Amino acid sequence: MKRNNMKWEKVCKPIKEGGLGARSLGEVNNAMLYKLYWVFKQGTEEWAKYFRSKFSTKSGDSIRYYKISTLWTGIKSGASLSKPYIGWFIRDGTQIDFWRDTWATDIPPMEYINMPRHMWKYCKAKLSYFINS
């Protein structure tokens, strides 16, 4: 019996291009991580609310220390994968957290300021405050 070996890249090519039409497992995994992160960010699902309470500080920031969870690791991976593809609609600025959201640069403004973490719970300004002032 003769075996035919084929590179995985070719297996994932469409049949019209000489492949087998299989989906790349890496691409499928990334798509699932994107979706996992998106549903988490929307915060409407019960599991997302639970994870937000478990892995966020009272001020809404992600925790900086490590907790064991493969799902949280996947959510963070989805965040880093999707970050280059996410943009902002500023509109009136009422939905944008001035300090924590990355609305102007790749880094939120709070990362530029050296202030004790526990003090950030008092910083609740929305971008609209600065637009309308």
Image (cartoon, rainbow, N blue to C red):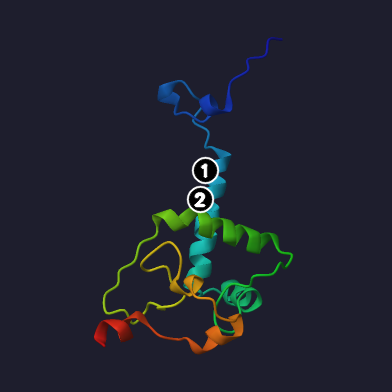
Give me the residue at 32% from left, 86% from top: 129
Check if mark 1's residue and mark 2's residue have beta carbons within 8 Å: yes
Q: Where's residue 6, x and y in %?
A: 59, 20
Q: Where's residue 122, x and y in %?
A: 51, 89
Q: Left or right of 62: which side holds 69?
A: right
Q: Left or right of 18: which side holds 77?
A: right
> In what quadrant of the picture does the C terminus appear?
bottom left
34, above or below 2, in the image: below
Give me the residue at 57% from left, 56% from top: 77
Give me the residue at 54% from left, 73% from top: 45
Nearer-the-camera pick, 26 or 131:
131
Instruction: Quickly name the residue at label 2.
Output: 31
Instruction: Say which quarter of the image contains residue 68.
Output: bottom right
Q: Where's residue 72, x and y in %?
A: 64, 64
> In what quadrant of the picture does the N terminus appear?
top right
Near mark 1 (Cα within 10 A), the count class, few <14, some 14-19 or many ≥20, is few
Q: CA distance from mark 1 to mark 2?
A: 6 Å
Q: Left or right of 19: which side holds 118?
A: right
129, above or below 23, in the image: below
21, above or below 123, in the image: above
Amino acid at the residue labelled 1: Glu
Say which element carries label 2.
Answer: helix
Instruction: Quickly name the residue at label 1.
Output: 27
Give me the residue at 39% from left, 64% from top: 105
